[in-house]
Amino acid sequence: MSKVVFPFSAFVNQEEVKLALILNVINPRIGGVLIKGAKGTGKSSFVYALPDILPKISVVKGCPYNCNPHDPTNMCDDCRLKTNLEIEEKPMRVISLPLGTTEDRLIGSINIEEIIKKGTKVLQPGILAMANQNILYIDEINLLPDHITDDILDAAASGWNTVEREGISLTHPARFVLIGSMNPEEGELRPQILDRLALSVDAKRIENENERAEVVRRNLMFETDPTGYLKILASEQEAIRTKITEAKKLLPEVEIAESLLMAVAISCAKLEVDGMRPDVIITKTALAIAAFDGRTNVTEEDVIKAAYLTLSHRTRKGGFQSPATKDEIKNTFQQMMAKYRGKGEGTFQASVVLDKKKELR
């Protein structure tokens, strides 16, 4: 029986946090979420509530790396060589990373003794193996040692984990939804790490007295009868789950106007945001927002929402300028979208371009 946790749909006035988490589930390639907030704002609770609204994942039965049987690019060498794969459905899980985790525990280790005895490569799976197709959660990510953080971000960026020992190398897929949380009062993250976490949201302090009272009511109802409270919200939870499932299917069909692509690029340049990563993340996020809303076309509003989530934590001018404010982001993007509106013909849809290239071969 699964652990009963406070339901995702019951959180009060935290829509931006919910949206950022859901978008990364719709497209894990967005690159993760950083949740910032003071103590008591429910940062961890959001994450542990997430699996209950997520669709199940397909895995190769018995594979320690949770390989995706429908995606050859997300398979270990053993699964790729098998002709008949046994498939099973599993609920997504939150894999928590303890602060004291060692590198061997994180990436896994190679059993040298088995290699000497049997001549076969044996990998003792680590946390990154468990995280494949699941959620990797790092609480107090700002307190994590730099070398551990770098290993995680490298795996998140490439989708693969490589273990090398004594001249022997083994690789397995590591595609996960990366979520980090932190209290800014306890120290900041290095700019290099901030840049690699795609989206950033603040868990709000709830100041409104009516909303604070509602938080108390919902918590008391859950503590009094957790199972009964979950039944009350079952239809809301199922509605979100269905919406996510449909969005994942719809995502490859979503198009973005070439004029919006140009507006994103010019806006990021005008804001002097460091690197090219923000342009890509804003576009991916806007596509996921449209899919979650059940649309196949990205709107200007989608782009601005995506820009808020992407740029609020990013340094500018090589780290010498603080992140753009919401007003700066909104004004710049609105000006550039107005400038390029109607210019640049057509729309861009990645799956269509790929299909056309296949036809030419």
Image (spheres, grey):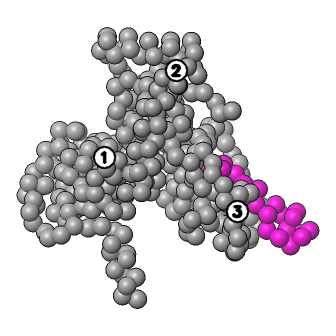
What amino acid is labelled 2 in the image? Tyr
What amino acid is labelled 3 in the image? Glu
Q: Name the residue carrying label 1.
A: 293
What amino acid is labelled 1 in the image? Asp
Q: Quadrant of the N terminus?
A: top right
**Residue 184 falls within the magenta-colored stretch:** no
Image x and y of residue 164, in percent = 70, 65
Image x and y of residue 117, in percent = 92, 68
Within 10 Å of disc 3 (Cα), the crowding (few <14, some 14-19, many 20+) is few
**Residue 118 falls within the magenta-colored stretch:** yes
The secondary structure type at the circle numbered 3 is loop
Image x and y of residue 217, in percent = 44, 12
Image x and y of residue 47, in percent = 51, 35
Could you tell me which residue is drawn at 31 percent across and 55 percent down? 287
Closer-to-camera residue (4/258): 4
Q: Earlier in the sequence, mark 2 or mark 3?
A: 3
Report how far apart the C-alphas of labels 1 and 2 lie in the structure.
27 Å
Q: The magenta stretch spans which residues?
A: 111-131
Could you tell me which residue is drawn at 65 percent across and 33 percent down? 2
For this orientation, the residue located farthest to the right is 117
Lateral position of residue 183 relative to residue 1, left or right: left
Q: Name the residue carrying label 3.
A: 86
| Depicted 207 relative to depicted 352: above or below | above
Q: Is residue 264 visible?
A: yes
Lateral position of residue 91 relative to residue 33, left or right: right
Could you tell me which residue is drawn at 54 percent across and 33 percent down? 48
Q: Name the residue carrying label 2.
A: 229
Lateral position of residue 216 relative to residue 59, left or right: left
Q: Earlier in the sequence, mark 1 or mark 3?
A: 3
Q: Which quadrant of the figure has residue 83?
A: bottom right
Report how far apart the C-alphas of labels 1 and 3 lie in the structure.
34 Å
